[in-house]
Image (tube, rainbow, N blue to C red):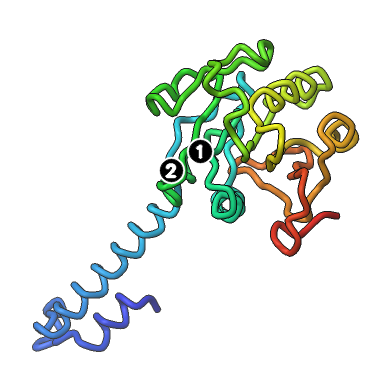
């Protein structure tokens, strides 16, 4: 029996068995309170999810699920506390949206091909991985934290994205996070000296390819550490 039914069963007033049951004032008040709590719980659940435009599979777009986005956001927050650096999000609009909600004090730049994200104004920079360094000079070596999710799992794509990372990252000390398929493990190590973490990113729409998170630093106990 549901909570609503219990309220009705326990507090209904039957003056005549042939008449429909009537609720006492106490029962009505209890029912209103219960429904209000249920509505609030649903609203809070909705607020946990960050709404994005719909995925465009023609652009190889697959949004992270909430746990993945929030886990990586927390990692970025930890890195930001030690660097104070702006963050570059390359082809990962889910992460950008969660960062703006969960850590609004962090400066974030989204580099993305999909011009629907121009809604983010000056925080949006058009990015085509086929032109890896065709970017504003103001972004050159401007970031100590760079997060990248290449749109494709090809060698060519990762090689060009690696050029973009070199353009964006500060050469002295930068934290790199790469989200891509397990099939890119050797290339990620060869091109960028990245290592897989124990944490396994997931997407709202489950993908057939095993997805991984690679970094150029050991996150210790965070993100499951290096494997």
Residue sitting at x 76%, y 20%: 157
- Using the image as rendered, state which of residue 187 and residue 94 is in the foreground: 187
Q: CA distance from mark 2 to mark 1?
A: 6 Å
**Rendering coords of residue 88 (x, y %):** 57, 33
**Rendering coords of residue 71 (x, y %):** 60, 54
Q: Dot 1 corresponds to which residue?
A: 96
Q: Is residue 104 left or right of residue 111?
A: left
Mark 1 crowdedness (10 Å alpha carbons): few <14, some 14-19, many ≥20: many
Give the quarter of the image for residue 45: bottom left
Residue sitting at x 45%, y 30%: 53
Quarter occupied by the C terminus: bottom right
**Rendering coords of residue 206 (x, y %):** 66, 42
Quarter occupied by the N terminus: bottom left
Residue sitting at x 10%, y 87%: 16
Q: Is residue 4 left or right of residue 208?
A: left
Circles 2 and 1: CB atoms closer than 8 Å: yes
**Rendering coords of residue 182 (x, y %):** 83, 39
Instruction: Count up the numbered dots.
Output: 2
Q: Which numbered marker is on residue 86? A: none
Report helix, strand or loop for mark 2.
helix
Query: What is the residue that sits farthest to the front in this orientation?
Result: 172
- Using the image as rendered, state which of residue 39 and residue 49 is in the foreground: 49
Q: Dot 2 corresponds to which residue?
A: 100
């Amino acid at each position: 029996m549901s909570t609503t039914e219990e309220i009705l069963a326990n507090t209904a007033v039957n003056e005549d068995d042939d008449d429909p049951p009537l609720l006492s004032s106490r029962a009505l008040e209890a029912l209103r309170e219960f429904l209000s709590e249920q509505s609030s719980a649903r609203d809070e659940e909705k607020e946990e999810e960050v709404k994005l435009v719909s995925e465009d599979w023609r652009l190889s777009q697959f949004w992270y699920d909430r746990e993945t986005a929030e886990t990586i956001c927390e990692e970025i927050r930890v890195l930001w506390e030690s660097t104070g650096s702006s963050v570059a999000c390359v082809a990962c609009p889910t992460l950008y949206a969660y960062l703006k909600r969960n850590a609004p004090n962090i400066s974030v730049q989204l580099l993305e091909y999909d011009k629907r994200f121009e809604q983010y104004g000056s925080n949006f920079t058009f990015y085509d991985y086929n032109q890896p360094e065709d970017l504003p000079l103001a972004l050159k070596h401007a970031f100590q934290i760079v997060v990248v999710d290449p749109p494709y799992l090809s060698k060519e794509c990762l090689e060009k994205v690696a050029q973009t990372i070199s353009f964006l990252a500060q050469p002295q000390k930068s934290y790199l996070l790469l989200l891509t398929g397990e099939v890119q493990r050797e290339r990620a190590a060869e091109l960028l000296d990245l290592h897989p973490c124990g944490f396994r990113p997931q997407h709202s729409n489950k993908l057939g390819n095993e997805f991984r998170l690679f970094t150029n630093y050991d996150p210790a106990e965070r993100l499951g550490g290096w494997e």
